[in-house]
Amino acid sequence: MHHDLSHRIETGMQTYPGDPEVVADAAATHDEDGFHVESISLGSHTGTHVDAPAHTERDGQTLDEYSVDRFVFEAIRVDCRDLEAREPIPAARVPDADADLVAFWTGWDAHWGTDRYLDHPYLSPTAAETCADRGLAVAVDALSPDPTPSPNAGDDEPDGFQAHHALLGTDCLILENLRTLEAVGDRFELRAYPLALSTDGAPVRAVGVTGPA
């Protein structure tokens, strides 16, 4: 079975703080032009998307430097729904198993479009380094594997983008803003092909495949 794990791209949708707003408007209509064309303005990290190393690493690869098969992953889902807001995911949660990617299932997609979505659990620096050491790409059903700025941020939280640097600095891709991870099992295939852009990241249509494809 195929499960859509992507948020819909639409005007006014939630973005990472400071990222470009998303606007989708009709540039041509059936009534006036006889056909319909949509004009879409968005940032490269809109909605469900993949981060390339160039996002945080000065000399990192851009998306167009990867073959399309890099965006198909044998994934392991790790249940982190017991964690509270802004609680770090510990290194002990990182699986030591044969896989390409670990999907940390926090359930935080339930808060999509609200202020609470900013206060998701995040990877501890040690957990991110463990993923990198094991060659695991990372997917999260939240804005970021790092803490997202919010009025509720604590003084003891990691600064900056430590998880991003640990992962992207070792060529481990990051997928953010997945949804409905409850639809897949603890092992599944994740297909997440980005738009064909030469850039630091791009929206994807993330699909989880379980059972016979």
Image (cartoon, rainbow, N blue to C red):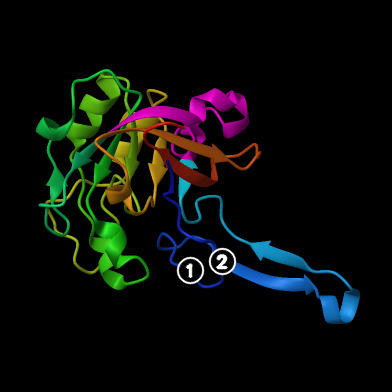
Examine the image and state in which quarter residue 30 appears. Answer: bottom right
* Amino acid type at mark 1: Met
Q: Residue under circle 1?
A: 13
Magenta stretch holds residue 74: yes
The residue furthest front is: 212
* Picture mark count: 2
Magenta stretch holds residue 73: yes
In terms of depth relative to the viewer, which is nearer, 209 or 65?
A: 209
In the rendered view, would you say 168 is above or below 98?
below
Q: Secondary structure at mark 2?
A: loop
Tell me the magenta residue range.
Answer: 51-76
Q: Going by the image, does 176 lie left or right of 123?
A: right
Which residue shows up at 54% across the image and 27% down it?
Answer: 61
Q: Estimate the x, y position of residue 195 in percent, counting from the top left.
A: 62, 43
Which residue shows up at 23% across the image and 57% down it?
Answer: 120
Q: Going by the image, does 161 lie left or right of 213?
A: left
Q: Estimate the x, y position of residue 14 in percent, counting from the top left.
A: 43, 66
Q: Residue under circle 2?
A: 22
Q: Estimate the x, y position of residue 165 in percent, counting from the top left.
A: 35, 34
Q: Crowding at label 2, few (<14), some or many (≥20) Cα neighbours within 10 Å?
A: some
Q: Secondary structure at mark 1?
A: loop
Which residue shows up at 32% across the image and 25% down it?
Answer: 136
Q: Crowding at label 1, few (<14), some or many (≥20) Cα neighbours within 10 Å?
A: some
Q: Which mark sits nearer the N-terminus, 1 or 2?
A: 1
Label placed on residue 50? none
Dots 1 and 2: beta carbons under 8 Å? Answer: yes
In the rendered view, would you say 34 is above or below 177?
below
> Label 1 to label 2, Cα distance in Å?
6 Å
The quadrant of the image that shows the N terminus is top left
Report if residue 205 is visible in the image.
yes
